[in-house]
Image (cartoon, rainbow, N blue to C red):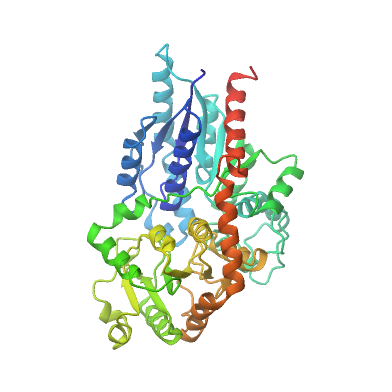
Amino acid sequence: MKRAELVFIPSPGAGHLVAALQFGKRLLQRDDRISITVLAIKSAAPSSLGSYTESLVASESRIQLIDVPQAELPPLEFAKSPAKFFILNIENHVPNVREALTNYVSSLHSKPDSVPIVGVVLDFFCVSMIDVVNELNLPSYLFMTSNAGYLSVMFHFPEQDSRTGAPPKDSDPDWLVPGIVPPVPTTVLPVSMTDGSYSSYLGIAARFREAKGIIANTCVELEAHAFNSFSEDQTTPPVYPVGPVLDLNDGQARSNLNQAQRDRIMSWLDDQPEESVVFLCFGSLGSFSEAQVKEIALGLEQSGQRFMWSLRLTPPKGSKTLTPIDCSNLEEVLPDGFLERTRGKGLICGWAPQVEVLSHKATGGFVSHCGWNSILESLWYGVPIVTWPMYAEQQLNAFRMVKEWGLGLEMRLDYKKGGEVVKADEIGKAVVSVMEDSEVRKKVKEMGVVSRKAVEDVGSSSVSLGRFIEDVMRNHFGSD
């Protein structure tokens, strides 16, 4: 039996790291010839990701962890352009990754019975490390934590830039992206194209086709149009749909919550009628101003619906943290008397165990930032979404959920974090719509069944995962 090792270099963001490690676990479960070494880049912001990674590695004997020494952070003024800050932070780590990977490869060469490295799986934000991988004569595979439509936008981006040479403006014509059915308004393109990160983001997109293959966290049944477009483009590397790749044990939430907090949330849900609760949660970086918090509260009250709200605030100006903070005194930020008037009908918490909440029988709707992992989780459990995108490619995800697939209810498609305050009336109507729209609920539940079948033994994503393994082994060992 020919054994083989893959090296993973995930990005340190929560949505990237968790999906990459879960994909690694799935590879190990599928093929006992494979082992994995993870080169771990630390997050630029304080988080529980380190403990999450260590816990997962400790549970898998064929995964080992090599910590990459922390590089100097980019100047904080770049944080106004989040993707630029993120990309620069990754690029600052290239020398440390080069040293760590070179030393590891050298150590294997000194052992006669060592398992050969057959490839390096890079998060798509880590494409600057393709050069390092090439220096060691190894193939690079990209892991896309988002969907195939977003991948199609990134393939199309350099071509679009060759015609315009400038960041898109709201008034520009819609983009005609081969992998997305409807024309894409420039207002829903990834925020990184317009927030000052344009040139850095273009540099990422320009290198996608250098990969030996691309692994995508999606399934072909959801995005058949995108995969057809890839097969028609001879310049596109093989794309392997292997999703949904999800952490159904919600290990990250367990790292952020103590047992008492979790028990409070789940026991409250246990007391609610089936499909009666709308869940509001906006991801690891989603937060609001106090003015917006008040409008959300009034909108929930006007809707008359039961609710669970993961409430996190934007850090005050001058704060050293870039990540949202939990609210220490709810009465200070909520409308007068709100807690008393909604007692028994709503629960407000900080960090929430999202997977457990979405899987609970009481949960009937989800007001979401439309991060791709959150969308996959909501589809998996058949919970319809109200769209309230914040950052990254979430506007594109929201647009496709509503306009391409009919799997979401539109509140906003082009909202950007820190944008205008959305008023209570609009929020209240959106909450009512997601709880009462039986047609969208039916379609979401049907897609949930489809997505589960995709990862079963003979499902499309399972077959694609097998093809990825075969191709990696053939590329290294030959066809024998």
Q: Left or right: 476 with respect to 98?
A: right
Q: How many marks?
A: 0
| Viewer-side residue, 375 vs 95 | 375
Residue at the spot x=61%, y=25% of the render?
475
Give the percent coordinates (x, y) of residue 63.
39, 32
Give the percent coordinates (x, y) of residue 181.
72, 60
| Viewer-side residue, 289 vs 399 | 399
Give the percent coordinates (x, y) of residue 3.
49, 21
Q: Left or right: 217 with respect to 183?
A: left
| Viewer-side residue, 304 vs 284 | 304
Q: Left or right: 184 with respect to 256?
A: right
Q: Is residue 397 visible?
A: no
Residue at the spot x=73%, y=54% of the render?
178
In the picture shown, does residue 402 fall above or below 166? below
Among the 4 quarters of the image, the one containing residue 113 = top left
In the picture shown, does residue 224 fall above or below 131? below
Residue at the spot x=58%, y=40% of the render?
462
Among the 4 quarters of the image, the one containing residue 471 = top right
Q: Is residue 79 visible?
A: yes
Residue at the spot x=31%, y=40% of the render?
54
| Viewer-side residue, 166 vs 459 | 459
Task: State which quarter of the image contains the C terminus.
Answer: top right
Give the percent coordinates (x, y) of residue 409.
57, 72
